[in-house]
Image (cartoon, rainbow, N blue to C red):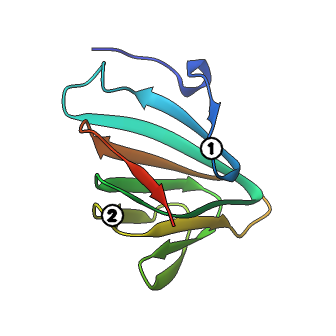
Amino acid sequence: MSVKHISEVPSEVVPNASGVSKQVLISAEEAPHFAMRCFTIQPGGKMPLHTNTVEHEQFVLSGKAEVTLGEEHYEVGPGNVVFIPAGTPHAYTNQGDEPFRFLCSIPNLEDHTMYL
């Protein structure tokens, strides 16, 4: 068990992206089944099209972005929930004047990211 505040969790730059950072809120070492991360995409920032070998469950906290899932494009904002099946190409582009932030949970399995 653990309790911490997000301000205590270090942030790291996401490689191959522009203006994107990640905080690992609950790591694979802390929880047996899922990890929880918080991503922040700065205004004008983007995460390019890529796939992962594990599913993603996401909850948007703030800001707005265009999310690409396969061939579909969605505008998302606070309160939206996004599910990305393993292997689905996806990308994010901040569409607003404030940071776009979302929680992302993934299973604690080996994950490979492939940029397309």
Closer-to-camera residue (33/52): 52
Is there any visible trace of residue 50 in the rendered image? Answer: yes
Picture quadrant where residue 27 is located = top left
The amino acid beneath tag 1 is Pro
The residue located at (30%, 53%) in the rendering is 53
Q: Which residue is mark 1?
A: 15
Q: Classify 17 as above or below 21.
A: below
Q: Is residue 73 above or below residue 112?
A: below
Q: Is residue 102 above or below residue 31?
A: below
Left or right of 110 on screen, residue 47: right
Q: How many numbered badges does the structure rendering display?
A: 2
Please tell me whether mark 1 sits on a helix, a strand or a loop.
loop
Local crowd size for mark 1, using a 10 Å CA cut-off: few (<14), some (14–19), many (≥20): few
The residue positioned 57% from the left and 38% from the top of the image is 22
Which quadrant of the structure image shows residue 44?
bottom right
Q: How far is mark 1 from mark 2, CA to CA?
A: 22 Å
When asked about the image quadrant of residue 85, the answer is bottom left
Query: Nearer the observer, disc 1 or disc 2?
Result: 1
Q: Position of residue 103 (x, y in %)?
A: 46, 46
Residue at image coords 48%, 62% = 50
Residue type for callout 2? Phe
Q: Is residue 99 visible?
A: no
Q: Position of residue 8 (x, y in %)?
A: 58, 18
Nearer the N terminus, badge 1 or badge 2? Answer: 1
Image spot of residue 66 (x, y percent): 59, 73
Q: Is residue 81 above or below residue 24?
A: below
Query: Could you tell me which residue is drawn at 25 percent across and 35 percent down?
Result: 108
Give the labeled residue for mark 2.
83
